[in-house]
Image (spheres, helix red, strand yellow):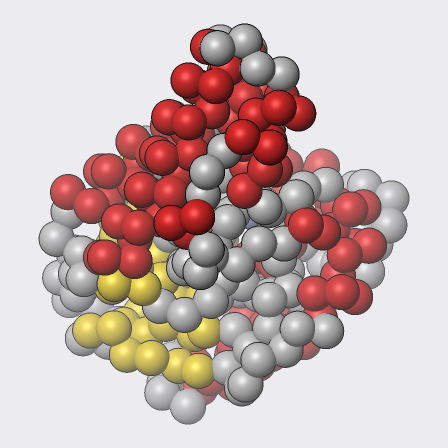
Amino acid sequence: MFLMAPNAWLLSLAVALGSMSASAQTKQLGADLYAYVSDNDASANSTFLIGDSEILVVDTGLNATEGAKLLGAIRQISKLPVKFIVNTHYHPDHQGGNLTVGPDATVISTDYTRARTIDMANAPGMAGFHFRAASLTFQKLIRLYIGRHVVEVYFPGKGHTSGDAIVYFAEQHAVAMGDLFLNRSSPAMDDGSATNWIDALDHVLSLSVEKAVPGHFDVGTKADLQRFRDYLKDLYGQVRSLKKKGESVDQVRQDIHMERYSDFRQYPNYHATFPDNAATIYNQLKSH
Ligand SMILES: [Zn+2]
């Protein structure tokens, strides 16, 4: 689900796989564009676009099993080859299915995601995963033309990790956010930046967007995206002012008031709780 470090992630996998929901769902977002909502928290959502002679897929799930489930859902709609895969970031739950979903596809990511994927593929304990790092990277923006559709993949700066990509489908008023958006959930915060993250969300909110595919959980509306942005902004403001008063990180963890977000999921095993997010922001402020 939300990887902090490969080993921590492996340890928490068994816990996460326990929280299965109903079966995976495919939802049409607009012309030729679909969201695949994973049936378990350990594997990320995907988005796919059907062109005239090819398919583009954003994120491929945790491993070969999850990738096969996604590919099965794609095959319900189209038999065309998967020619492009965009990985929103390096966490295994977003890219572990690359080889299953598109063995011949061109994989696209930021440079940071590519580098971290190669590191992870060589890390001890990860031998069972068959990662396939990007063969095509970009700096700020790459535009793909899939049939009659235009897809914009861009890097908004550090956010959830140091190299997240956002995929914008302007014509369908839809966006695939990776873990930069979780629907009504406290996010994990890897080596990213809360301020850039808030700016990235503000930018997406300035676009013509009606549907946002989160890294996990159900497809969101613009209002859901706004609420997630408000959560981060609110928390950031509270942490900054408590820190200015001289509070320690442990005091800040206690003193934040997040009652307005009581419907948000929190995951202590992924360090994805309100106090965990507050501590991450505190430490980011410290290093500025
Ligand atoms: Zn992630």
Please state if 186 lies on the left or on the right of 78 as rendered.
Answer: right
Q: Residue at x 12, y 53 (%)?
A: 208
**Image spot of residue 267 (x, y percent):** 63, 54
Q: Camera-side residue: 206 or 95?
A: 206
Q: Is residue 204 left or right of residue 165?
A: left
Image location of residue 141, percent across then percent down:
29, 37
Query: Compared with residue 203, is residue 50 higher up or lower down, i.e. above or below?
Result: below
* Residue 110 visible within the image: no
Number of numbered discs on residues: 0
Q: Nearer the viewer, residue 222 or 6?
A: 222
| Identity of the residue drawn at 57% across and 25% down | 252
Viewed as shown, does residue 152 lie left or right of 238?
Answer: left
Q: What residue is drawn where x is 32% and y is 43%?
A: 229
Q: Is residue 288 above or below residue 70?
A: above
Picture coordinates of residue 84, whole percent (x, y): 41, 60
Q: Is residue 27 above or below residue 136?
A: below
